[in-house]
Image (cartoon, rainbow, N blue to C red):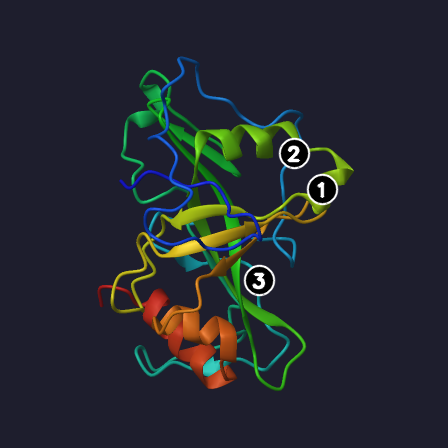
Amino acid sequence: MQPSRAPGEGGEFGKDGENVERPVGRREHGPRSHPGTGRCQDRQPGRTACPTRAVASAGTSTDTGFSCACCGEHHAETPMNFSSPAPVHWEPGMERAKKCELTSDQCVIRGEAFFVRGLIELPVLGHDEVFSWGVWVSLSERNFLRASEMWENPARESEPAYFGWLSTELFPYEPTTINLKTMVHTRAVGLRPTVELEPTDHPLAVEQRTGITMERVRQLAEAVLHAGA
């Protein structure tokens, strides 16, 4: 896993060799969850947790569904969100390990790797709603602790963006989405942060910048709903 970096002066992605922090986990402390009991919600509430590889959740569009090219069945609604409940680095049994903790919004692995959950939102052309991927991003220890400190503070919307490495494998995309550079933008209390990808030519980054069609949404739904078929 690559060490995380602090955000640049202007909230920039930073270049290799710039703004590099020491690898996380230098200080000894246990896993730290956000204060309070409130959980963040996606932009459209009502999402359910899914397996580590992104699968369908409860957010759906207002259209009349689609006929699936994989199974031939008609799906009454088109999923508009797919989510992963844990970073790709999380392994079964870690919940019993020392200094490991996973909540719906944050994750700590061995007291040295720190993650927050956010949304990569893709504009849907010709529609008011967005399609979103629920993903995990690794932050530096400093930024993770700062995000935790500000978790229930209304002033958190004024926080500068945090640099992070994408830590969810979105398998409909090639090459891999692991370790794409991102900026995490904190939103109002109760809402998950949005995740901005570095503007590269990676297909996911391109779709975030230019938007996708509803037909592309259906293609993504087919790929995820019938993964491994």
Q: Earlier in the sequence, mark 3 or mark 2?
A: 3
Mark 2 secondary-structure assignment? loop
Q: Mark 1: which amino acid?
A: Val
Residues at marks 1 and 3 touching, judged by CB atoms closer than 8 Å: no
- Which residue corresponds to mark 1? 189
Quarter of the N terminus within the rendering: top left
Nearest the viewer among 80 and 110 is 110
In the displayed structure image, the side of residue 193 where residue 103 appears, left or right:
left
Q: Would you say residue 74 is visible in this rendering?
A: no
> Whole-percent x and y of residue 212?
49, 80
Q: For the view shown, which residue lies furthest in the left direction?
A: 228
Which numbered dot is residue 59?
3
The answer to which of marks 2 and 1 sits earlier in the sequence is: 2
> Can you give x and y, in whole percent of width and height, for residue 6 in the image?
47, 40
Q: Residue 23's x, y, as percent?
A: 33, 30
Which numbered marker is on residue 35?
A: none
Q: Position of residue 26 (x, y in %)?
A: 36, 20
